[in-house]
Image (cartoon, rainbow, N blue to C red):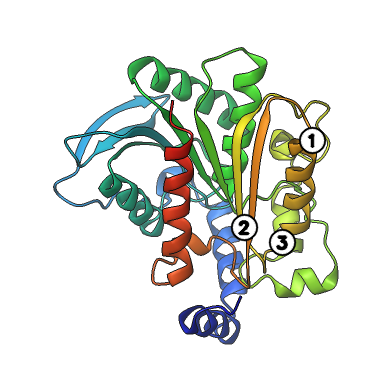
Amino acid sequence: MPISATARALNQKLKETKYRQELMNNFAQTYEQPIDERPLDDTFPQSVQREQYYLDERLVQRLTLTDTIKGELFMIHGGGFVMERSLAFNRIVTAFLKMGYAVTVPDYPLAPDDTARIQGWTLQVYQNWVQQTTGSHFIFGDSAGANIALRLAFDIRDQGLARYSAMELLSLCPDRTFSATPEQRDADLVLDADQMQQMQEDVAFTPFDFMHETNYADLGQVRFDSGENEVSVPAVEQLAETMAQEPGNQVTCEIHSEMIHDFLMWQMLPEAKVALQAVDQYFMDNKH
């Protein structure tokens, strides 16, 4: 299916401006920056209502915009495990708020200093969330946030905790070696496989690699959305196929033609708007 003129123009612009190298440089600089000096965007419409608390000095917020709540949504941001929440991510949060979700955004600990804390911290916040809210519970993970979300799914299963209704994994990078052909590496306009691999060499990132798990069963409703241009697509497809063959899983995998990593964050794209509506429908189809 042909992509929109807007998407084609964006892909061309990313090539011309060397966006990938600029982002990788930003990741590298942020990696060396003290965590308390990294910029965090907390921009939301003034009409958004906030409840918040801190867990080990990291902020957790529950946001609402509508009087009627159709579901509780736990949204985990991306940023290579090193960046704080961004304006682009907040805009997707706002889109879900306008749809009628209550959205909880956990500002998890960051690499490299606190990589080992991410898994346990997120699990504690999840437990607080399901204990303090009612109705259907959905999880949305974006990029590195998708890796954190999927690890959370394994931990929920292994500890016998209350199960979410459905999970969305946007632009998951399940193989921290970023193994791919030269053609696949060149096609990715956002992530440089070599530099991403170097950033995640530390053993503390091991929980966020999913290619060598021994038990993929009983993870529930899981949807993968990735752009066709992403270097991680072969690993995502392999993981989705493996999970789909295991009991206790209902897996959906959508690879979007010629789309880039995290394409949903580029809300000017018609394809992003369609995909966002599809995720909303997926959640509603699995509402408990």
Which mark, residue 284? Answer: none
Q: What element carries label 1?
A: loop
> In the picture, residue 193 is in which quadrant?
bottom right
From where the camera sits, is residue 84 visible?
A: no
Which numbered disc flags the more N-terminal residue, 2 or 1? 2
Q: Quadrant of residue 86?
A: bottom left
Mark 3 → mark 1, Cα distance in angstroms: 33 Å
Q: In which quarter of the image is residue 97?
A: top left
Residue beneath the point at 59% across and 68% down = 260
Q: Position of residue 82 (x, y in %)?
A: 55, 48
Pick out the residue farthest to the front: 285
Q: What residue is shown with label 1?
A: 245
- Looking at the picture, which amino acid does disc 3 mark? Gln
Give the camera-side residue of 5 and 14.
Answer: 5
Disc 3 marks which residue?
195
Amino acid type, label 2: Ser
Could you tell me if the residues under marks 2 and 3 are in contact, i.e. CB atoms within 8 Å?
no
Is residue 76 shown to the viewer in this render?
yes
Q: Mark 2 points at which residue?
A: 226
Classify 10 Å Cα crowding around label 1: few (below 14), some (14-19), many (20 and above). few
Q: Which of marks 3 and 1 is nearer the N terminus?
A: 3
